[in-house]
Image (cartoon, rainbow, N blue to C red):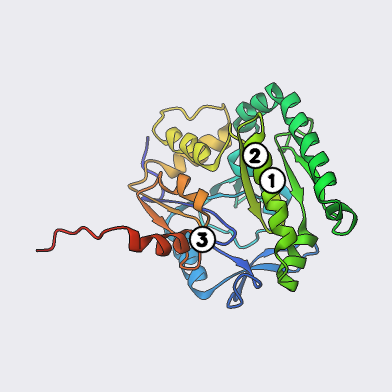
Amino acid sequence: MTKGLFSTLFISGLDNTLFQSKWMDSTGLHPMSRSVSGDPQGYATGAQAELWDAMRHEAFCVGVSARNFEQICRVDGWDPIHEHQLMLIDHGMTLLYRNIFKDEGWAPIEGWSLPYIEMANRNAAALKKEGTELSFELTKHMPDLVTVHNSKLVYSTLPGFNNTNVFYSVRAGALYSHALVNNDMAPLNKLRSLLHRHVSTSELPLTYFEIDGTFSLLPGWFSKKTAIQRLIAMLDSPEPGLDDPRLNAAIRAIGKPKLILTAGARPDDVEFMSLGHFMLTPTKSTITKNLVEQQSEIPLLTDIV
């Protein structure tokens, strides 16, 4: 592999890592993302903006996010300076490419998604069955979820593969907002308990994922970690594969980095973060919170005598 433009590869989560809503951190100053209506929604603090400015100038940057295509197109603040750019979305199942010298925006590299689509098609009946059972349980045990809070169960697809459902979610934004505004967590916790019970009894290997009022049940054949593993493996290969000139151009631009930095905020992000040489996380992240809570249980071992 030829030498890339940078010696550092920066692989980072987006929400709650490089920016977050004012609700999450009122000290945010720099707009990074927009809401559906076009208003600023996610803001970077001064420290987050400083970190991002350093990385976008000094590293090849790859984002990894649970966002879908429409949502990632509203993240205007992701603006590395290198020509060929990559972004993993849909929990790693979709790889996007853009060239900043061509005003074409993000576009999917569809060959990347084929293994996930194959698995989803193979398990389509089971996925539909699990979603139907969950919908029944929600109607039975939490009828107000639909009638009062306008929540619903939705299936997600990938760009270019609109006929294949890859996972399902409960969108309960109104319930989530009600819980935060009124400090009434009981209905929200009831929903979480019901979803965790669904995961534990499912015939499919499911993982629970929650962000901003969307509660997703993710089959075990995809993850951010396996997506990053695939991408890093391509850096060691003389031919990245997928027969896509856009991806080949990006892989050549990355080259063989001497340093891989990763950043994330959620405990499950640690899985992909551990694939780099150093991990970064905000001091207010759940990762940090968990570490602080555990530190008293971990003996400090040093070579100081």
Q: Which residue is mark 3?
A: 286
Q: Which mark is residue 195?
A: 1
Check residue 108 in the rendering and tell me which mark sits there, or answer none: none
- Residue 191, given in percent of the width and then of the height, sits at 72, 52
Tell me if residue 73 can be seen. Answer: no
- Examine the rendered structure and indicate whether residue 167 appears above or below residue 258: above
Q: Position of residue 73 (x, y in %)?
A: 69, 53
The residue at 63%/30% (across/down) is 116
For the residue labelled by badge 3, is the local secondary structure a helix, a strand or a loop? helix
Q: Can residue 23 be seen by looking at this rendering?
A: yes
Q: Position of residue 227 (x, y in %)?
A: 53, 38
Disc 2 and disc 3: Cα gap in Å? 22 Å
Query: For this rendering, which residue is in front, 32 or 196?
Result: 196
Q: Are marks 1 and 2 in contact (CB under 8 Å)?
A: yes
Q: Residue furthest right?
A: 147
Residue found 77% across the figure and 39% down from its top: 134
Q: Secondary structure at mark 1?
A: helix
Q: Residues within 10 Å of mark 2 (few under 14, many from 20)?
A: many
Pointer 2 residue: 199
Residue type of the residue flagged with mark 2: Val
Q: Amino acid at mark 3?
A: Thr
